[in-house]
Structure formats: C-alpha cells, structure tokens
Image (tube, rainbow, N blue to C red):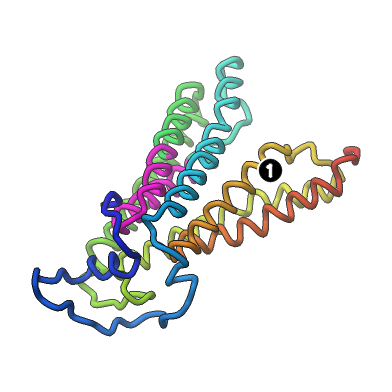
C-alpha cells in the first residue's frame, strides 16, 4: 500500500519482491534492469524524508488547483442548462489517467502523495462527467456514456493484464529492484501523460498563429508550470522515473509556454 513508507528507496523496493526472515541475512539477488548509479532511478534522497514529503505535498496542492479549474465550466453549463459545445473528452481522459496512477501508487511503496492527489482527482473528474451527463440530452448524452464505459473497460483490461497476467509470464522488471507490475504500469502511465501534452502544444500553436495569448491564460500557464516542476523535482529526488519522465517533458513545455506568453503578451488577435 502507498502508506508503507520505507526507510530507504532501495530497501523498500526489495521488500516488495522477497521478504526476509527475521534474524537472517538478506539475500542479494541480481535483478535484470537498469544498472545502479543512475540518479533518475536511484534518487537523490529518501522517499520518506522531510524534503520528499514537502515537495510531494506542494505538488499535491498545485495539482489540486488544476483539477478544480473545470468548476467554472460546470457553473457555466448550469447557467446555460446545457453543455452546448463543451467537450467531455478531457474529463474522461483525466479520469483514466488518475485511475491508472492510483493503482500505480498503490503497488509502489512510498507514493502516498501521488495516491492522494490522483484519488481526489479521479473523484473530481468523475463528478464533472456526471455533471455533463446531467446537462446533456440526445446524442451528446449517449456519446458521453459510451466514451465513459469504453474508458472503464479499457482501464479494467490494462489492470488485469498488469496485475494478473504479467506476474505469471516471468517477465523481468525494467529497473533493478522494481517489480515488473510496477514498471510496466509505470510505462503506460508515463506514455499517457506525455500524450496529454498534445493539448498545450496545440494551444501554443494557436498563440503563434494568432499572435495573441487570449487562449493561454497566465494563471493557468503558471499553475501548469508549478505543477510539472514540483512533480519533476519529486520524481528525480525519490528516483521514480515513471513519475519523472512526463514531468521533465512537461517542464520543458511549460517553459516554452511562459516564453511564448512573454513574447506575445502585448500582441493583438489576428
């Protein structure tokens, strides 16, 4: 469970694979995977020390602020009495993402912050989907139901493959001292997160095309930057490459967004 905060990253991860009898010397097992000495996988500190805990909860607060951003859209939908042209895709994708990270955090010791924010985020995204279902009719209502059910089925298949099939196939982990289940689910979570950067990239293209930052609000851009930077620091400090990779890339995207904002902030829409 994510509440099992270890005294050290490597010791905690070894504890997942083969428990040691009390009073006996621990067995040293050579595990296939990335070699030791890599700061991206070894980490810079302990995942339960003060710095890791602090930066983890800073990331939680900043991510929660982003998760609450659609509340304004939901209030507008209520005033209009219909979802009109608003899309539910971002909510369904975010719910899918949160559910996967909840499972990842549950099977990876020391990931309590990731577990908390994705559990809360999943509840919020689910609430937004229910809200859209309430204020939609006809084809839009059916579309939201179909996409949501499809996402849930896809999630169930992925988790069954990862937790039930992979352990019986004898597949080696990617990173030494990890389990195969953790690593392959981590890969999928990272790839999905990276794919979600298509949205900010499209907004950046729109800013360049129109020479206006109208569709890239400063506070939202700063929020995304703070969120990705904090999770990137957390990932590299505790040595969790799967949390780190999408946020390293996200930090680069956020920096480019801020640069574009500064360059076009005085421009006029064309």
Q: Does residue 102 show up magenta in the picture?
A: yes
What's the magenta bit mostly, secondary-structure-wise? helix
Give the residue drawn at x 30%, y 61%: 7
Q: For mark 1, give the secondary structure.
A: helix
Where does the image place residue 206, in percent across and percent down from the top left? 78, 47
Between residues 185 and 155, which one lies in front from this camera angle?
Answer: 185
Horizontal relation, residue 70 to residue 161: left or right: right
The relative height of residue 27 versus residue 8 in the rendered view (above or below) is below
Identity of the residue drawn at 60% across and 25% down: 72
For the residue pair 187 and 31, the one nearer the viewer reads as 31
Query: What is the x, y in percent for residue 19?
Result: 15, 69
* Residue bearing mark 1: 221
The C terminus - image quarter:
top right
Q: Up-down: is 251 above or below 136?
A: below
Q: In the shown orientation, is residue 39 left or right of residue 183?
A: right
The magenta segment: 92-121
Q: Is residue 173 magenta?
A: no
Task: Describe residue 120's horizontal placement relative to residue 212 as left or right.
Answer: left
């Amino acid at each position: 469970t994510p509440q099992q905060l270890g005294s050290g990253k490597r010791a905690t991860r070894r504890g997942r694979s083969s428990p040691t009898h009390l009073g006996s010397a621990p067995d040293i097992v050579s595990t296939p995977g990335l070699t030791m000495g890599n700061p991206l996988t070894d980490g810079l500190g302990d995942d339960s020390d003060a710095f890791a805990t602090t930066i983890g909860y800073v990331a939680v607060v900043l991510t929660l602020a982003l998760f609450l951003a659609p509340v304004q859209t939901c209030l507008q939908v209520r005033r209009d009495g219909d979802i009109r042209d608003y899309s539910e895709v971002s909510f369904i994708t975010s719910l899918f993402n949160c559910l996967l990270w909840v499972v990842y955090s549950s099977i990876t010791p020391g990931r309590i912050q990731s577990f908390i924010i994705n559990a809360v985020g999943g509840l919020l995204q689910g609430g937004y989907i229910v809200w859209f279902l309430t204020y939609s009719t006809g084809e839009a209502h059916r579309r939201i139901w179909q996409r949501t059910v499809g996402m849930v089925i896809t999630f169930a298949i992925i988790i069954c493959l990862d937790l039930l099939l992979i352990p019986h196939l004898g597949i080696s982990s990617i990173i030494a001292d990890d389990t195969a289940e953790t690593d392959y689910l981590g890969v999928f979570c990272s790839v999905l997160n990276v794919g979600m950067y298509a949205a900010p990239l499209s907004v950046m293209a729109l800013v360049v095309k129109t020479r206006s930052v109208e569709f890239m609000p400063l506070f939202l851009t700063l929020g995304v930057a703070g969120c990705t930077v904090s999770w990137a620091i957390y990932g590299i400090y505790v040595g969790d490459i799967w949390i780190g990779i999408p946020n390293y890339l996200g930090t680069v995207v956020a920096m480019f967004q801020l640069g574009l904002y500064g360059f076009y902030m005085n421009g006029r829409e064309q």
